[in-house]
């Protein structure tokens, strides 16, 4: 009997049907085939049918999580044989100009410069280290240069000066401040000058002093003359001279024979009375002060100078010996439209511990007595560069270093022209720097070009049109240049003629620091829309100026002779249709004692693989270029 025609089993004693799920057993009396069918029906068709929806959801989740792995296997299984070989080999393809662009096949081109890729082993160095002093590199498309407002400025020698501006108080010139005192005791019978502030002239009589001692001394003088006592006569003359009576007055006394009863007290200088100590009729002792007289033809301004500016001030010995003279300009609130000229005459040897400043004294001419003691004035001190020890020392060190390089280069003169002349150009530039320093000029960059990160200062230099590199520079203190523009003198990092970014430099730096892959404008940048290899293609909407780019690249060759040779060669002998200069500064190599220029380092091996063929190509390229120019 078949399983389908078998009678239904009897119910269980408790009334539960034998095929109930609660029984978890096949009905009795079934054949082996019937039991298999019963269990298949029970487990597959009944149980799992209820979990079908959950199983489908789990399967979808696994596919989503493992999608990258599945896609990778798919590409591996469907890749053509040539590409499979390239991917499985130990070689890779990179752009010599932009080492961060790496591909696994040679079919693509560099997305930045659109040049063919070069082959290398994967074990070779992938990350090309930046040259010393270069913190980063960045390349912008022409459109992005315009959008970012990039502007450049050529580094040059400029007339600079360090200006120290401070505030001080106008004071009396102590060298021209005199006190008039009584030289003999007596009574002030007459005061010709009896008020503060009154102007007096040198030799003008200020007061008459009656003195019994004066009368006695004069009488002794006359008696000594009458008796012919020379020693006593000389003694009394000296005594009268100490009281302020000159030789003419003494001779008049001896001639007339009349004794003076009053001593005339003259003004020692031209000025005005700033203080009167006595009153008319007052008895005074010897040495009693009568007047204070000040000459205001010149005044002092004592100003506070911060510690950071002390390096720009001359030493006391330099000021006293007048080896250094620093001019100063003062402006007062009382005469805001007028400037007063003076010079630095003294720097205090101690500092104020509360303000951390040092007092510097300036002496100024005071026409019409407009500078009044007790008022304030803003003083600007102009320090020429040759006065600053920092610049003199830096120039000397650079010159000695380059001279040492030049001597080493001449020692190896037999190795060829470029080696022998390696240090000549920097040596000449440093010698020019010394001459410029003597003229008050320094190699400088505008303040807008400098990015101060706190730990270092960076200036973006244009390598060629559209390509920039961040250069770590050493700068001097901020100084004032032409048209009242602030500049920083360059101590190290830049050379005369370098083009640096002024407008847009902060945007350039912020983009590279905050987002190294900010758009398709940087090396190996990604704009979010990736190609087959994961890197987007750069397609500038504004065409590049190839001639300007080539000219900038060739100008960086070490000598003028090399530049002319590269212009005559025009093309790279290894990479076809690659113009010299479009991939940066051409690489100079010596092939069988002949100079040859390559478009990049990636062509070096190809140039030496067959030297004779390379030289033949170079000669052919030169002839082709010469014919095109005719």
Image: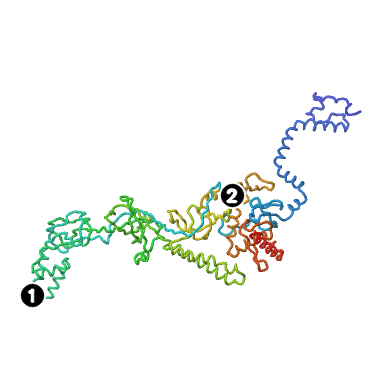
**Alpha carbon separation for disc pair 1 and 2:** 112 Å
Q: Kindly identify which residue carries mark 1.
A: 227
Check disc 1 and report its element: helix, strand or loop: helix
Locate residue 144, reporting x and y percent: 58, 47
- Locate residue 356 relative to residue 221 in the image: left or right: right
Q: Residues within 10 Å of mark 1 (few under 14, many from 20)?
A: few
Name the residue at 42% across, 58% down. Answer: 161
Furthest residue in direction top, as rendered: 15
Locate residue 178, reporting x and y percent: 23, 61
Q: Nearer the viewer, residue 438 or 119?
A: 438
In which quadrant is the C terminus drawn?
bottom right
Give the image quarter of residue 165. bottom left
Q: Residues within 10 Å of mark 2 (few under 14, many from 20)?
A: some
Check disc 2 and report its element: helix, strand or loop: helix
Picture colour scheme: rainbow
- Locate residue 257 relative to residue 565 in the image: left or right: left
Q: Nearer the viewer, residue 608 or 392?
A: 608
Above or below, 55 against 174 in this view is above
Q: Kindly identify which residue carries mark 2.
A: 142
Circle number at residue 569: none
Give the image quarter of residue 593. bottom right
Locate residue 322, reporting x and y percent: 35, 66
**Disc 1 vs disc 2: Cβ atoms closer than 8 Å?**
no
* Circle nearer the N terminus (1, 2): 2
Furthest residue in direction front, as rendered: 630
Give the image quarter of residue 1. top right
- Locate residue 269 relative to residue 558 in the image: left or right: left
* Total numbered circles: 2
Furthest residue in direction right, as rendered: 1
Q: Comparing marks 1 and 2, which lies closer to the viewer?
A: 2
- Locate residue 283 relative to residue 497 in the image: left or right: left
Locate residue 476, reporting x and y percent: 46, 58
């Amino acid at each position: 009997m078949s399983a389908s025609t078998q009678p239904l089993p009897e119910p269980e004693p408790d009334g539960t049907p034998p095929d109930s799920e609660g029984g978890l057993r096949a009905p009795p009396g079934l054949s082996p085939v019937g039991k298999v069918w019963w269990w298949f029906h029970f487990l597959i068709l009944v149980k799992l049918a209820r979990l079908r929806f959950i199983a489908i959801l789990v399967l979808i989740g696994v596919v989503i999580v493992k999608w990258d792995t599945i896609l990778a296997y798919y590409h591996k299984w469907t890749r053509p044989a040539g590409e499979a070989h390239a991917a499985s080999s130990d070689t890779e393809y990179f752009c010599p100009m932009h080492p961060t662009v790496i591909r696994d096949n040679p079919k693509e081109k560099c997305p930045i410069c659109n040049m063919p890729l070069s082959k290398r082993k994967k074990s070779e160095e992938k990350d090309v280290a930046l040259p010393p002093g270069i913190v980063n590199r960045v390349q912008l498309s022409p459109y992005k240069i315009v959008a970012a407002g990039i502007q450049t400025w050529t580094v040059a020698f400029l007339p600079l000066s360090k200006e120290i501006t401070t505030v001080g108080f106008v004071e009396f010139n102590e060298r021209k401040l005199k006190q008039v005192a009584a030289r003999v005791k007596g009574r002030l019978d007459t005061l010709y000058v009896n008020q503060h502030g009154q102007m007096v002239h040198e030799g003008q009589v200020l007061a008459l002093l009656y003195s019994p001692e004066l009368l006695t001394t004069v009488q002794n003088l006359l008696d000594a003359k009458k008796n012919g006592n020379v020693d006593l006569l000389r003694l009394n003359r000296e005594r009268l001279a100490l009281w302020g009576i000159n030789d003419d007055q003494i001779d008049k006394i001896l001639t007339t024979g009349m004794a003076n009863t009053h001593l005339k007290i003259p003004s020692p200088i031209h000025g005005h009375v700033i203080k009167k100590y006595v009153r008319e009729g007052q008895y005074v002792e010897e040495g009693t002060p009568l007047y204070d007289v000040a000459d205001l033809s010149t005044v002092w301004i004592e100003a506070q100078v911060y510690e950071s500016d002390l390096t720009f001030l001359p030493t006391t010995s330099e000021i006293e010996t007048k080896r250094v003279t620093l001019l100063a300009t003062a402006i007062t609130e009382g005469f805001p439209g007028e400037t007063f000229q003076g010079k630095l005459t003294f720097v205090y040897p101690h500092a104020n511990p509360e303000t951390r400043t040092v007092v510097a004294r300036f002496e100024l001419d005071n026409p019409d007595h407009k500078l009044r003691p007790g008022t304030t004035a803003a003083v600007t001190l102009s320090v020429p560069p040759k006065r600053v020890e920092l610049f003199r020392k830096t120039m000397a060190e650079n010159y000695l270093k380059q001279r040492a390089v030049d001597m080493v280069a001449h020692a190896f003169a037999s190795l060829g022209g470029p080696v022998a002349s390696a240090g000549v150009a920097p040596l000449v530039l440093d010698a020019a720097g010394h001459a410029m320093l003597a003229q008050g000029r320094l190699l400088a960059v505008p303040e807008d070009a400098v990015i101060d990160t706190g730990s270092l200062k960076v200036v973006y230099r244009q390598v060629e049109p559209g390509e920039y590199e961040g250069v770590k520079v050493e700068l001097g203190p901020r100084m004032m240049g032409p048209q009242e523009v602030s500049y920083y003198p360059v101590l190290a990092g830049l050379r005369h003629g370098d083009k640096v970014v002024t407008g847009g430099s902060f945007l350039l730096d912020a983009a590279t620091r905050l987002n190294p892959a900010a758009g398709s404008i940087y090396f190996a940048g990604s704009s979010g829309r990736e190609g087959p290899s994961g890197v987007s293609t750069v397609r500038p909407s504004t065409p590049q100026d190839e001639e300007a780019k080539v000219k900038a690249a060739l100008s960086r060759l070490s000598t003028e002779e090399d530049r002319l040779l590269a212009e005559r060669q025009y093309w790279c002998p290894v990479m076809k249709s690659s113009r010299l200069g479009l991939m940066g500064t051409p690489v100079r190599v010596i092939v069988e004692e002949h100079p040859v220029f390559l478009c990049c380092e990636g062509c070096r091996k190809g140039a030496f693989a067959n030297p004779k063929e390379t030289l033949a190509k170079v000669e052919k390229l030169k002839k082709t270029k010469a014919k095109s120019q005719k």
